[in-house]
Image (spheres, rainbow, N blue to C red):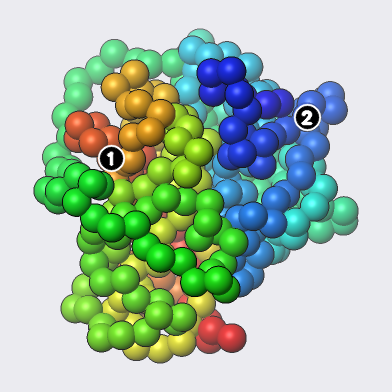
Amino acid sequence: MLFRSGARVTPFESETATSALGDGRYSVDISGNWSVPTGPNGGYVAAVILRALTAEVDDPERSPRSLTIHYLSAARPGPAEVRVAVERTGRSLTSLTARLVQGDRLIAIATAAFSSPRSSVEFCDLTMPAIPGPEHYRAPTLPADALPIARRWDTRWAIGRPRSPMNPGPTADRAVAGGWIRLPECQPIDAMVAAAITDAWMPPVFSKVDAMIAVPTVDLTIHFRSALPLATLAADDFVLAVFRTNVIAEGFLEEDGEVWAPDGTLIAQSRQLAVVMPFG
Protein backbone atom coordinates (compact mmCIF):
# COMPACT_ATOMS: atom_id res chain seq x y z
CA MET A 1 0.00 0.00 0.00
CA LEU A 2 1.33 3.42 -0.95
CA PHE A 3 0.54 6.33 1.34
CA ARG A 4 0.36 9.60 -0.56
CA SER A 5 1.52 12.99 0.69
CA GLY A 6 -0.60 15.42 -1.32
CA ALA A 7 -0.58 14.44 -4.99
CA ARG A 8 2.68 12.50 -5.06
CA VAL A 9 4.25 9.38 -3.64
CA THR A 10 7.46 10.35 -1.88
CA PRO A 11 10.66 8.27 -2.04
CA PHE A 12 10.18 7.27 1.60
CA GLU A 13 6.64 6.06 0.92
CA SER A 14 7.85 4.12 -2.11
CA GLU A 15 10.75 2.55 -0.20
CA THR A 16 8.47 1.45 2.66
CA ALA A 17 5.47 0.49 0.51
CA THR A 18 3.54 -2.71 1.14
CA SER A 19 1.24 -4.70 -1.14
CA ALA A 20 -1.56 -6.74 0.44
CA LEU A 21 -1.51 -10.44 -0.45
CA GLY A 22 -4.45 -11.44 1.75
CA ASP A 23 -4.70 -13.24 5.10
CA GLY A 24 -2.54 -10.60 6.81
CA ARG A 25 0.38 -11.03 4.42
CA TYR A 26 2.11 -8.05 2.79
CA SER A 27 4.86 -8.11 0.20
CA VAL A 28 7.61 -5.50 0.52
CA ASP A 29 10.80 -4.64 -1.31
CA ILE A 30 13.58 -3.86 1.16
CA SER A 31 15.59 -0.94 -0.22
CA GLY A 32 19.39 -0.76 -0.17
CA ASN A 33 19.15 3.02 0.13
CA TRP A 34 18.90 2.65 3.92
CA SER A 35 21.94 0.46 4.43
CA VAL A 36 24.45 0.67 7.28
CA PRO A 37 27.48 -1.65 7.54
CA THR A 38 25.34 -4.57 8.76
CA GLY A 39 22.45 -4.14 6.28
CA PRO A 40 19.29 -2.02 6.01
CA ASN A 41 18.88 0.16 9.10
CA GLY A 42 16.66 -1.04 11.95
CA GLY A 43 14.59 2.15 12.01
CA TYR A 44 13.83 1.73 8.31
CA VAL A 45 12.86 -1.89 8.92
CA ALA A 46 10.59 -0.69 11.75
CA ALA A 47 8.87 1.72 9.34
CA VAL A 48 8.26 -1.09 6.83
CA ILE A 49 6.72 -3.33 9.47
CA LEU A 50 4.63 -0.47 10.87
CA ARG A 51 3.31 0.27 7.37
CA ALA A 52 1.97 -3.30 7.15
CA LEU A 53 0.53 -3.16 10.67
CA THR A 54 -1.23 0.12 9.90
CA ALA A 55 -2.73 -1.34 6.73
CA GLU A 56 -4.01 -4.36 8.64
CA VAL A 57 -5.65 -2.20 11.34
CA ASP A 58 -7.24 -0.13 8.56
CA ASP A 59 -8.76 2.41 10.94
CA PRO A 60 -7.60 6.05 10.82
CA GLU A 61 -9.09 6.61 14.28
CA ARG A 62 -6.67 4.10 15.81
CA SER A 63 -3.11 5.43 15.84
CA PRO A 64 0.00 3.41 16.70
CA ARG A 65 0.82 3.80 20.38
CA SER A 66 3.50 1.16 20.92
CA LEU A 67 5.78 -0.85 18.65
CA THR A 68 8.42 -3.32 19.81
CA ILE A 69 10.67 -5.11 17.34
CA HIS A 70 13.22 -7.85 17.98
CA TYR A 71 15.80 -8.13 15.21
CA LEU A 72 16.80 -11.76 14.66
CA SER A 73 18.79 -11.50 11.41
CA ALA A 74 20.11 -8.72 9.24
CA ALA A 75 17.74 -7.81 6.42
CA ARG A 76 19.01 -7.73 2.85
CA PRO A 77 17.89 -5.51 -0.02
CA GLY A 78 15.23 -7.31 -2.03
CA PRO A 79 11.80 -8.93 -1.71
CA ALA A 80 10.41 -9.77 1.72
CA GLU A 81 7.08 -10.42 3.37
CA VAL A 82 5.42 -9.07 6.51
CA ARG A 83 2.96 -11.48 8.11
CA VAL A 84 0.54 -9.71 10.44
CA ALA A 85 -1.86 -11.22 12.97
CA VAL A 86 -4.53 -9.25 14.83
CA GLU A 87 -4.36 -10.76 18.30
CA ARG A 88 -7.27 -8.80 19.77
CA THR A 89 -9.50 -5.86 18.87
CA GLY A 90 -11.29 -4.14 21.74
CA ARG A 91 -13.49 -1.08 21.94
CA SER A 92 -10.52 1.28 21.61
CA LEU A 93 -7.34 -0.84 21.47
CA THR A 94 -6.07 -3.22 18.79
CA SER A 95 -3.13 -5.53 19.58
CA LEU A 96 -1.13 -7.14 16.78
CA THR A 97 1.97 -9.18 16.06
CA ALA A 98 4.06 -9.30 12.89
CA ARG A 99 6.92 -11.30 11.40
CA LEU A 100 9.25 -10.04 8.68
CA VAL A 101 10.65 -12.88 6.55
CA GLN A 102 12.96 -13.11 3.53
CA GLY A 103 12.86 -16.54 1.92
CA ASP A 104 13.35 -19.01 4.76
CA ARG A 105 15.00 -16.38 7.02
CA LEU A 106 13.09 -14.79 9.90
CA ILE A 107 14.35 -11.21 10.05
CA ALA A 108 12.28 -9.64 12.82
CA ILE A 109 9.28 -10.17 15.06
CA ALA A 110 7.10 -7.32 16.33
CA THR A 111 4.26 -6.52 18.69
CA ALA A 112 2.17 -3.39 18.39
CA ALA A 113 -0.76 -1.57 19.97
CA PHE A 114 -3.07 0.84 18.13
CA SER A 115 -5.67 2.95 19.90
CA SER A 116 -8.06 5.80 19.48
CA PRO A 117 -7.42 8.79 21.79
CA ARG A 118 -8.47 8.29 25.41
CA SER A 119 -9.59 10.93 27.91
CA SER A 120 -7.38 11.04 31.01
CA VAL A 121 -5.23 13.26 33.18
CA GLU A 122 -2.17 14.50 31.32
CA PHE A 123 1.29 15.83 32.17
CA CYS A 124 4.80 15.77 30.69
CA ASP A 125 7.78 16.31 32.96
CA LEU A 126 10.22 15.94 30.05
CA THR A 127 11.53 19.15 28.54
CA MET A 128 12.63 19.66 24.96
CA PRO A 129 16.34 20.62 24.81
CA ALA A 130 16.72 24.39 24.54
CA ILE A 131 18.78 24.84 21.37
CA PRO A 132 18.57 27.20 18.37
CA GLY A 133 16.45 26.24 15.37
CA PRO A 134 17.77 24.21 12.42
CA GLU A 135 18.62 27.34 10.42
CA HIS A 136 21.36 28.02 13.00
CA TYR A 137 23.30 24.87 12.01
CA ARG A 138 25.12 23.89 8.84
CA ALA A 139 24.19 20.81 6.82
CA PRO A 140 27.01 18.25 6.86
CA THR A 141 29.16 17.67 3.81
CA LEU A 142 28.96 13.98 2.98
CA PRO A 143 32.03 12.18 1.63
CA ALA A 144 31.73 10.20 -1.58
CA ASP A 145 31.89 6.93 0.38
CA ALA A 146 29.20 7.88 2.92
CA LEU A 147 26.84 5.08 3.92
CA PRO A 148 23.65 5.02 1.82
CA ILE A 149 21.46 5.92 4.82
CA ALA A 150 23.35 9.20 5.28
CA ARG A 151 21.82 10.47 2.03
CA ARG A 152 18.28 9.56 3.13
CA TRP A 153 18.19 12.13 5.94
CA ASP A 154 18.62 15.90 6.06
CA THR A 155 20.30 16.51 9.42
CA ARG A 156 21.68 19.37 11.48
CA TRP A 157 23.93 18.13 14.29
CA ALA A 158 23.20 20.22 17.40
CA ILE A 159 23.71 18.09 20.52
CA GLY A 160 26.84 16.19 21.54
CA ARG A 161 30.04 15.53 19.65
CA PRO A 162 29.81 14.30 16.01
CA ARG A 163 32.17 11.37 16.35
CA SER A 164 32.12 7.87 14.84
CA PRO A 165 34.48 5.00 13.92
CA MET A 166 34.83 6.67 10.50
CA ASN A 167 35.20 10.17 11.98
CA PRO A 168 37.37 9.85 15.12
CA GLY A 169 38.25 12.72 17.41
CA PRO A 170 38.29 13.70 21.09
CA THR A 171 35.81 11.82 23.26
CA ALA A 172 33.01 13.44 25.25
CA ASP A 173 32.13 13.01 28.94
CA ARG A 174 28.58 11.86 28.17
CA ALA A 175 27.12 9.62 25.50
CA VAL A 176 24.51 12.01 24.10
CA ALA A 177 23.87 13.00 20.49
CA GLY A 178 21.15 14.56 18.40
CA GLY A 179 19.89 17.44 16.38
CA TRP A 180 17.36 18.50 13.79
CA ILE A 181 16.26 15.93 11.22
CA ARG A 182 13.82 15.51 8.34
CA LEU A 183 13.56 13.56 5.11
CA PRO A 184 15.17 15.38 2.15
CA GLU A 185 11.89 15.10 0.23
CA CYS A 186 10.23 17.04 3.07
CA GLN A 187 7.50 14.53 3.80
CA PRO A 188 5.22 15.22 6.78
CA ILE A 189 6.22 13.31 9.91
CA ASP A 190 3.74 10.44 10.09
CA ALA A 191 4.15 7.41 12.36
CA MET A 192 6.31 5.57 9.84
CA VAL A 193 8.76 8.48 9.52
CA ALA A 194 8.82 8.90 13.31
CA ALA A 195 9.65 5.20 13.72
CA ALA A 196 12.54 5.51 11.28
CA ILE A 197 13.86 8.60 13.08
CA THR A 198 14.15 6.70 16.38
CA ASP A 199 17.05 4.72 14.89
CA ALA A 200 18.35 7.28 12.41
CA TRP A 201 21.02 9.16 14.38
CA MET A 202 24.66 8.27 14.93
CA PRO A 203 24.73 6.17 18.12
CA PRO A 204 25.64 8.47 21.03
CA VAL A 205 28.03 5.87 22.47
CA PHE A 206 30.46 6.74 19.66
CA SER A 207 30.98 10.18 21.21
CA LYS A 208 32.14 8.73 24.54
CA VAL A 209 33.90 5.44 23.80
CA ASP A 210 37.37 5.55 22.26
CA ALA A 211 37.14 2.15 20.57
CA MET A 212 36.24 0.82 17.13
CA ILE A 213 32.85 -0.72 17.85
CA ALA A 214 29.59 -1.48 16.08
CA VAL A 215 26.25 -1.53 17.92
CA PRO A 216 23.62 -3.53 15.98
CA THR A 217 20.14 -3.38 17.49
CA VAL A 218 18.74 -6.35 19.40
CA ASP A 219 15.35 -4.81 20.16
CA LEU A 220 13.70 -1.44 19.68
CA THR A 221 10.58 -0.15 21.45
CA ILE A 222 8.83 3.00 20.29
CA HIS A 223 6.08 4.78 22.21
CA PHE A 224 4.19 7.23 20.03
CA ARG A 225 3.15 10.11 22.31
CA SER A 226 1.12 12.03 19.71
CA ALA A 227 -1.25 10.96 16.97
CA LEU A 228 0.54 11.68 13.70
CA PRO A 229 0.88 13.63 11.52
CA LEU A 230 0.58 16.74 13.69
CA ALA A 231 -1.50 19.54 12.22
CA THR A 232 1.09 22.03 13.51
CA LEU A 233 3.97 20.45 11.52
CA ALA A 234 4.56 21.60 7.95
CA ALA A 235 5.93 19.19 5.36
CA ASP A 236 9.34 20.90 5.36
CA ASP A 237 9.67 21.22 9.14
CA PHE A 238 12.55 19.59 10.98
CA VAL A 239 11.97 17.72 14.23
CA LEU A 240 14.47 17.45 17.06
CA ALA A 241 15.82 14.00 17.96
CA VAL A 242 18.07 13.39 20.96
CA PHE A 243 19.56 10.08 22.12
CA ARG A 244 21.46 9.01 25.26
CA THR A 245 23.31 5.93 26.48
CA ASN A 246 23.99 5.59 30.19
CA VAL A 247 25.14 1.99 30.61
CA ILE A 248 27.31 -0.56 28.82
CA ALA A 249 27.43 -3.89 30.65
CA GLU A 250 28.32 -7.42 29.61
CA GLY A 251 28.49 -6.49 25.94
CA PHE A 252 25.15 -4.67 25.70
CA LEU A 253 24.05 -1.05 25.86
CA GLU A 254 20.76 0.82 26.09
CA GLU A 255 19.89 3.87 23.99
CA ASP A 256 17.01 6.14 24.98
CA GLY A 257 15.56 8.58 22.47
CA GLU A 258 13.08 11.44 22.23
CA VAL A 259 11.61 13.04 19.12
CA TRP A 260 10.19 16.56 19.51
CA ALA A 261 8.19 18.88 17.27
CA PRO A 262 9.61 22.42 17.09
CA ASP A 263 6.78 23.71 19.31
CA GLY A 264 7.80 21.37 22.13
CA THR A 265 5.26 18.60 21.48
CA LEU A 266 6.72 15.20 22.33
CA ILE A 267 6.19 12.98 19.27
CA ALA A 268 7.83 9.73 20.34
CA GLN A 269 10.06 8.07 22.91
CA SER A 270 12.25 5.08 22.18
CA ARG A 271 14.51 2.61 23.92
CA GLN A 272 16.69 0.05 22.25
CA LEU A 273 19.07 -2.65 23.41
CA ALA A 274 22.14 -3.07 21.23
CA VAL A 275 25.05 -5.48 21.30
CA VAL A 276 28.56 -3.98 21.46
CA MET A 277 30.97 -5.67 19.08
CA PRO A 278 34.26 -4.87 17.31
CA PHE A 279 33.90 -2.74 14.18
CA GLY A 280 35.32 -4.04 10.94
At a point 14% along the width and 50% down the height, the residue shown is: 131
233 and 151: which is toward the camera:
151
Q: Which mark is residue 19?
A: 2
Residue 255 placement, left or right of 107: left
Give the residue at mark 1.
260
Q: Helix, strand or loop at disc 2? A: strand
Marks 2/1: CA–CA distance: 31 Å
At a point 24% along the width and 32% down the height, the residue shown is: 265
> Is 96 located above or below residue 258 in the figure?
above
The amino acid marked with disc number 1 is Trp
Q: Is residue 161 visible?
A: yes
Residue 149 lies in what quarter of the image?
A: bottom right
At a point 19% along the width and 78% down the height, the residue shown is: 173
34 and 57: which is toward the camera:
34
Q: Residue at the right extreme?
A: 103
Q: Helix, strand or loop at disc 1? A: strand
141 and 4: which is toward the camera:
141
At a point 80% along the width and 37% down the height, the residue shown is: 27
Quadrant placement of the N terminus: top right
